[in-house]
Image (cartoon, rainbow, N blue to C red):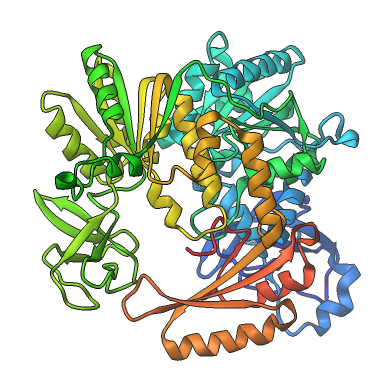
Amino acid sequence: MKESQTAPFGTIDHLYITEVVPIQKGMTKETLSYFTKEELSIGSFVKIPLRNKEILGLVTQIHEASNMKTDLKSSSFALKKLSRSRISAELSSAFIQASLLTAEYYGTTIGSILGALIPKILLENPPLISSAKKTTKGEETVREPFLIQLPETDRIREYKSLIRESFARKRSVLFCVPTHEDAMRTFDLLSMGIEKYTYTTSNKPAKALIDTLKAAHKEPHPILFITTPAFISFDRQDLHTIILERENSRAYRTFSRPYINYKVFCEFLAKASGKTLIMGDSVLSLETLYKEKQGVYAELSPLKWRITRDSKSMLIDMKGIAQKQPEETKKTFEILSPELIGLIAQALAEKKKIFLFGARKGLAPSTSCRDCGALLACENCSSPMVLHKKAGAPLYICHACGARRSSETRCDNCKSWNLMPLGIGIDRIEETVSELFPEAQIFVLDKDHANTSTKARAVAKKFASQKGGILIGTEMAFPYLLKIPFIGLVSIDSLFSIPDFNINERIFYLVTRLLDIAEEQAIIQTRNIRKTIMTFAERGNILDFYRAEIEERKELSYPPISIFVKIQYTGTQPDIEQRAAYLKRLFEQDEPDFMISKGMQSGKLVLSTILRFQRDEWPIRSVREKLLLLPPEFSIKVDPESILS
């Protein structure tokens, strides 16, 4: 029988009808049906024809054709034959169950979820996919996820103890971190004494990565497998513990379809397989802390609600400094306080390192008109134009869509030339520090100066090799830093202007992470000294921050009390009106809210539809069915980090 032939339903003895999930991101079909004479098993992989090519598929259901004879004869379509026999790889029922639950949670198909969970190198080399077939011992007594909230040094000590205990019980550990830099750093911190049994997937070319995976599967001794979410599908028969480090990191979210948070999958996987899930950070996410208070999660060790540090810290009121300036200098916008200038001078004199943090790239994050007060916006997408210096000359660049404008541009509103750059960007910090300390070695680490991980690693390595020096950077620099003697937070105030429900949590986490890096002293500058969040962060007061923030979110019914579903469509005004009417009819019972904004493409608008549900009721089957009806032109984000972007 040729591959293109359809099933001979007159003679269906020893034929099987197989339901196969096509593994591909963006896949809109749940399953495809094929016939085969081969006895396959649920969880096995097969090659299936799709759009003139072959892709990997996962067998999820098998039926004997003889039991479906009537249905098959009355079917309006012909079934195709599976093109090839099975592949020597299989996923466990627990992994499949966790993937199904994740697909339900995010309103998408299991094939799309599997496409996000299984990296390309494994899809191209299916035998490397190995998922424990048997259930984990103790599956019948599945426990809730455990939490660790401790400073990094204490967490590492706790992790080492957990790994030693696991090895003693002949059990392996999967240790997941958000980025490749975190993985390499964690490898150095945890592999000491167990180098032979520690494996990592990071910073390896394809052949070396394949060799690492093969070795990790074959090693008879329990192993420590350190990876990013890309290889969360790795499994062994003796793997009993999953550790999710830096649980509060935004890098656990995918930035393309399907939009998921790997933490959600890990929780489903732990429940389905009986594995122990442990999540740790210096400050756990507000959602995780809320679930701990609700009894959904448990403490592995008592959560530390106040961070104690050996280093000193100081909160500086930059508005107060400006008000004390003499009248003739008040028009000068000072970005460094006398205290921070003194700390930089001390670091240079003692030949010690100092890291200066800025929240934004460029010279100035925004520009306003002195005459009418209007902000200079991108002509394409209406985002604020950021002033940069390119080839020694100032230039406005939009960070949303990349559009550029001359620095000699006029105000869009009143056509005035009287424009004033506002805020503090990385380039402006570098300019100021260079003027004050012309002999100092200065390194800059942000996307403008190091747009690849290789370049970023080179900057970090050069800074680390120096006895002293000044590193200026954004949040991008964090994974490359260990402990630094001195820390200066130059500016984070621009983040307060972002009208998003989780911005306070993000600011609190950034400030506490910075303070954790400081060995001796840290200075935090702010023009929002009255914001209690800054005091909470400087004092390491997690408990009072949590209480204040969760109370506000309860009042407004924001996450984690509720869950948002965001549906976006980009198009012209007539298209937007049609789609809005369609979505209003489709989700009428769910009381949708609509927002229209200018998008990242010239002449296009973005329609954002926001649905809100009680978290303990999610997922809702009827809503998921509606989401699956939406064509690919709609972008769907369940539980998004932001409702603005």
**Quarter where residue 64 is shown:** bottom right
At a point 58% along the width and 38% down the height, the residue shown is 128
Going 21% across and 66% down the picture, which residue do you hit?
370
Which is more toward the observer, 271 or 354?
A: 354
In the image, residue 336 sits, relative to residue 8, either above or below, namely: above
Q: Does residue 37 lie above or below 481 as drawn?
A: below
Residue 147 left/right relative to 324: right
Q: Residue at x 27, y 18 (%)?
A: 347
Where residue 48 sits: x, y (%)?
Answer: 61, 61
Q: Where residue 403 sits: x, y (%)?
A: 25, 66
- Residue drawn at (53%, 72%) of the image: 568
Q: Is residue 464 left or right of residue 436?
A: right
424 left or right, relative to 565: left
**Residue 123 visible in this rendered orientation of the protein:** no
Which residue ends up furthest to the left in the rendered image? 392
Residue 185, placed above or below residue 629: above
Residue 122 x, y percent position in the rendering? 54, 43
Image coordinates for residue 414, horizontal then vertical, percent? 21, 78
User: Could one spot residue 579 in this view of the protein?
Assistant: yes
Q: Nearer the viewer, residue 152 or 325?
A: 325
The quadrant of the picture occupied by the N terminus is bottom right
